Image (tube, grey):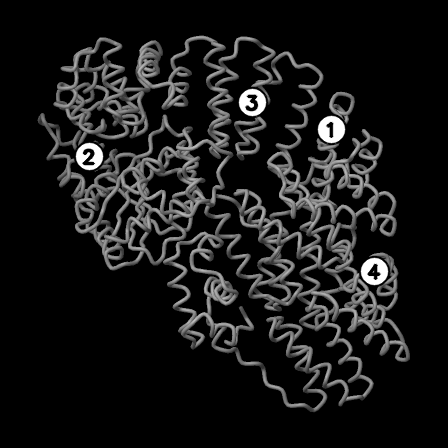
Amino acid sequence: MGVPSIDAQAGLLGRDRELAVLEGVLATAKAGNSAVLVLRGEAGIGKTALLDYAASRAVGCRTAAIAGIESEMKLPFAGLQQLCTFTCTLGRLQELPEPQREALSVAFGLLDGKAPNRYLVGLAALDLLASAAEAQPLACFIDDAQWLDEESMEVLVFVARRLMAEPIALIFALREPDDHCELAGLPELILDGLSESDARTLLASALRVPLDPLVRDRIVAEAHGNPMALLELPHAPAELAGGFWLPGRRPLASRIENAFYQEFRSLPQDSRRLLLTAAAEPTGDPCLLWRAAGLQEIPETAAAPAEAAGLVECGTRVRFHHPLVRSAIYQRASAPDRRAAHRALAEATDPHLDPDRRAWHLAHAAARRDESVAVDLECSAGRAQGRGGAAAAASFLRRAAELTPDPARRVTRALAAAQTAIDAGGADQACNLLAAADAGPLDDLQRARLERLRARLVFSQMRGSDAPRLLVDAAHRLAPLDTTLARDTLLEALGAAIFAGSLSEGAGLREVAEAARAGPLPPTPPRMVDILLDSMVSRIIDGYAAGVAPLRHALHVVQQEQASGATDADRRWLWLAFRVIPEPLACELWDDDAWHELATGAVRTAREAGALAVLPMALTYQAFSHVHAGEFDTAAALIDQATEISEAVGGVPMMYTSLVLAAWRGQEPQARDLIETTIEEVRARGEGRVLSLAEYATAVLYNGLGRYDAALAAATRASQYEDVGIFGWALAELIEAAVRNGQPEAAMAALDNLTERTRASGTEWALGVGTCSRALVSDDQAAEALYQEAIEHLKGCRIAIHLARARLLYGEWLRRQNRRQESRAQLRSAYEALSRFGADGFAERARKELLATGETVRKRTIGADTDLTGQEAQIARLARDGHTNQEIAAQLFISPRTVEWHLGNAFAKLGVTSRRQLRSARLLRI
């Protein structure tokens, strides 16, 4: 680990519990399994000392240690590349599958290419580390993880969440408090201060001068057991005036920095200049440091006093005693001195081998605006974007804007930086950049672009609410200046209005559609964006029947775009199209085939493109289609995968499909908790559409449980606003609940509304649901033929859950007609299907009806295959379908060894010994 931050024995005083945990982590890896640990604690608490101890105890393991550096946080994949270098895994790049090899090579700047697939980068890193651990266990230590670049942290957390059957120990240490929510859920160990007795012992070992007992007690009290404070504060003579400490009001870390800075100030001038240059150089490359030192005429003898003071070690790498030494030196240096160090480092950096780091140093060396440096930074931003480092690109562009002398060009760069920051999820940075652009000389087009970016920023933060109005206003500004961008913005406004639903503030869905119809005409030939926009406008303004044909054409166009492979320029619109089209509009058309194909295609495209924000959403929508197909366990496995990916990249899991799945499963406590939590969250975010979806889910839940009054109330709330894709579903639930609740007038009113949609749609799904709903309100003479017709329609589509419900309703009607023998056939079929799906509420309804016919029915027992976890079930299904371990690993973002481990568990539970036997095994719940 290099130079320890605290004396090895003193730093471990009183840490028996922590040492035992570390020993356990290493023992797990040595035994052939994975172990991950996050050490958290304040600066100086002893995290690095514990990592040093763990490294010394990793006998028989290959070890690799890296440390985050605050000044290097904006260089994408820098930390990951360092770890792969130290583990000697880069030599194994050629052994990776080509997509992974290319993605990692582009990320590391070894190849030129388009922005790499983030998931392929993560999978490549996982495979490299797993292969490095084949010969002997691997122990990786990541110190100061709070200062890793965003891209490296994302990948390493991705790896950490997928380690399972590999002999790898991965230990992070980071300062507390921090905002790295992506580490949440990983095993962690919080480091507290030492006990008072241990603190006194440690302080006594560090004292160089006699100390008044009262002062000693005060130091112990105010250090709060922090080992570094107890070791370093007594070394600051200015703060121990004749043995009487003069405490300040600064934070503890600041006081420790001051102790280090006092030692730094006592060094000769050349040693201080050398250490400042080292503090400004994040890689720890001694060759680069000495080239920069030579340019400043710093002699080689300057290192000796600094090393003798214990502040730094200059060996094969330059390492500071502790990160606080680096920050104390760098932050307290004068601005001219810092610029001189960066200028020398820029001159010493090869412009061909490392142009981005050179540009970074030049930016820090600039005392005034400099167009040549701004151009270099702009080029670096392009390279960062190409390597998938959107956050780094935004930072490069921000600094480029700051250094641009020409005010008009400064505005252009600030807007570009804001656009990139929004895409990278940097809301605060984007807000500051937009404010900077607003202060410049904006022309009309730039002003319109600025307003559009502000509206997009609002939508990214709140989804619904005020975003539709702001986007429409931006589109109006753009219309006379850039008709293409104006129409793009109007489609974004429609998407925002669909999300906002009944909670939209200002411009609602119809107002946005009217603005789009009055806006610029589409080009010839129209783009996919234009077809989507115009079809949506037709549906909203002209009514459902008139809108069916344009919407169906739009769905077809999106399907063609997916099948043909969209260009990078079009892919952003495929994502927006996916948010607006497959789930809401395919369901609006009751087109189950289009829904399935678009959702499946979106998952495939997102995987291929490495779309960081879109894949969890695509998986969630794909899961939604499986819910309606009665494939609940498949849906649950997809939801789990979406949640894992969201958590791995620090996103918020989408719970929309989860709450509908919970409702169909009929488990009231879990479903109600999830629904109530969702309602509270989406109301705060202004997402009215999801509010309606939650009410629809509540109606499904209570219709299944036979509590029709609660179902009617929820369905009524869900159908108060015509949310795209949900309104028709809510009407069907309302009709059943109203009939069972003795309110035929409410049922008939809803039926008229539903029939308009189902007849215009004309799909088997639509006709089946519409006819079944009509049967519910019909007299006995007409009802039977309608139920039979509904069942025939539903047999012709993927929506198995509604077919089972139609059989249940028909069976219930037959029993009430005292046709028990005939009712049993329908009820038994419904019960078997609903039980197989896991729709427990509706299955119990069917069971009770069967009992009422005089048939003996026992609750279905769950077979051995239901012991499979969601991951095991998904892997078993993929193996059954002929996929290799490597292919399954690539699809699920785990290592092949983990696939093998899960598959072994699945084989044991299912009682099979080969993949071929999986095809005949009882895998109904996979």
Q: Are marks 2 and 1 in contact (CB under 8 Å)?
A: no
- Other residues around mark 2 within 10 Å, as few (<14) / some (14–19) / many (≥20): few
Give the answer, above or below, for where 718 lies relative to 817: above
- How far across and how far down the image is residue 806, in percent? 75, 73
Lateral position of residue 796 relative to residue 844, left or right: right
Alpha carbon distance from label 2 to label 1: 57 Å
Lateral position of residue 129 relative to residue 810, left or right: left
Q: In the image, what residue occupies the spot 41% across and 39% down? A: 104
Q: Label 1, secondary structure: give it.
A: helix
Q: Amino acid at mark 2?
A: Gly
Q: Quadrant of residue 857?
A: bottom right
Q: Amino acid at mark 3?
A: Leu
**Mark carried by residue 2:** 2
Alpha carbon distance from label 3 to label 2: 40 Å
Label 4 vs 1, first from the N-terminus: 1
Give the answer, above or below, for where 816 lies relative to 698: below
- Other residues around mark 1 within 10 Å, as few (<14) / some (14–19) / many (≥20): some
Q: Quadrant of residue 257?
A: top left
Label 2 vs 1, first from the N-terminus: 2
Q: Label 4, secondary structure: give it.
A: loop
* Residue that mark 3 sits on: 433
* Residue that mark 4 sits on: 762
Label 2 vs 4, first from the N-terminus: 2
Q: Amino acid at mark 1?
A: Thr
Depth check, front residue: 747 or 145: 145
- Which mark lies nearer to you, 2 or 4? 4
**Mark carried by residue 484:** 1
Q: Quadrant of residue 91?
A: top left
Q: In the image, what residue occupies the spot 45% across and 75% down? A: 910
- How far across and how far down the image is residue 907, in percent? 42, 72
**Mark carried by residue 291:** none
Alpha carbon distance from label 3 to label 1: 24 Å
